[in-house]
Amino acid sequence: MPYGRELLLHGEKRNAVLDLAEIQRFGIDSYGDADYVSIYGLQPAQWYTRGIRLLGRTVVECTRDALAGAIGRDVAALTGDTPQALVVDPFVGSGNTLYWLLRYLPGAHGLGFELDSRVFELTRRNLLIMGLPIEILNVDFVAGLSRIHAAPGDLLVVFVAPPWGKALDPVSGLDLRLTEPPVTSILDQLRRAFAHSRLVCAIQVYESLQPESLSELQARFEWQALRMYGLNAPGHNHGIVLGTIGWKPLNG
């Protein structure tokens, strides 16, 4: 059996800590690349040797370096030099997207929330090993957002990538209204919680998108743009909807 996505997401390896051979086998079987699951700027053999460990489902779901770096560059191009920004990942997982966002937003503070206690403990340990200045809390995104006290005009950068669950249909594509929780409800919560702040939201999406769900998402922003990254085979790429709440860029 190929060592692919379904085995790690739904099989016995879902909640198991994978060894290096399993991580590399997943990369080879799924993408033809043993180094596919590169995180924190390191290839699997490098980060595994340092003591970094991931669960099977995190190996599948994490935003690898190539994608997270592209997201970080696009976010930084929009926000410019804003050292006091707070960068938030409400579903932090491995923390790799926060790592790359902070690389491109030097001086910003990184904060992540992770409800799953096993993922949280591993990620907290991994970040300590790497010496990364990222704070993560073992809470859900609603409780986490309630702990943020932003002054009027503050800039918050939020990476929104909730579990897709059954939201990705092989025929109709990704329906952003069916993620867990729905992306639209997350954005509504952000608008209510930070009505006097400036928000930049980067929502992870898939190359095949359900059109109505995309329209509902785009309508929630003052300015928005779709960015798709050609890192995988055609039809299997990821991207972001980059949008602003509470302000518009000068060139928007």
Image: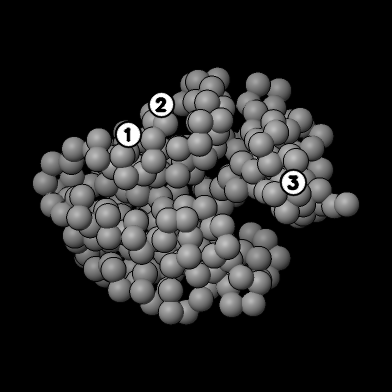
Residue 106 in sight from this viewpoint: no
Query: Which residue is painted at 42% across and 64% down in the image?
Result: 241
Residue 40 pos. (x, y %): 56, 35
What amino acid does circle 2 point to?
A: Pro
Helix, strand, or loop for circle 2? loop
Residue 245 in sight from this viewpoint: yes
Q: Marks 1/2: CA distance? A: 8 Å
Earlier sequence position, callout 1 versus callout 2: 1
Earlier sequence position, callout 3 versus callout 2: 3
Circles 3 and 2, Cβ within 8 Å, touching? The answer is no
Residue 134 pos. (x, y %): 41, 30
Circles 1 and 3, Cβ within 8 Å, touching? The answer is no
Say which of marks 3 and 2 sits in front: 3
Q: Is residue 209 left or right of residue 18?
A: left
Query: Which residue is painted at 50% across and 70% down in the image?
Result: 175
Q: Which residue is mark 3?
A: 11
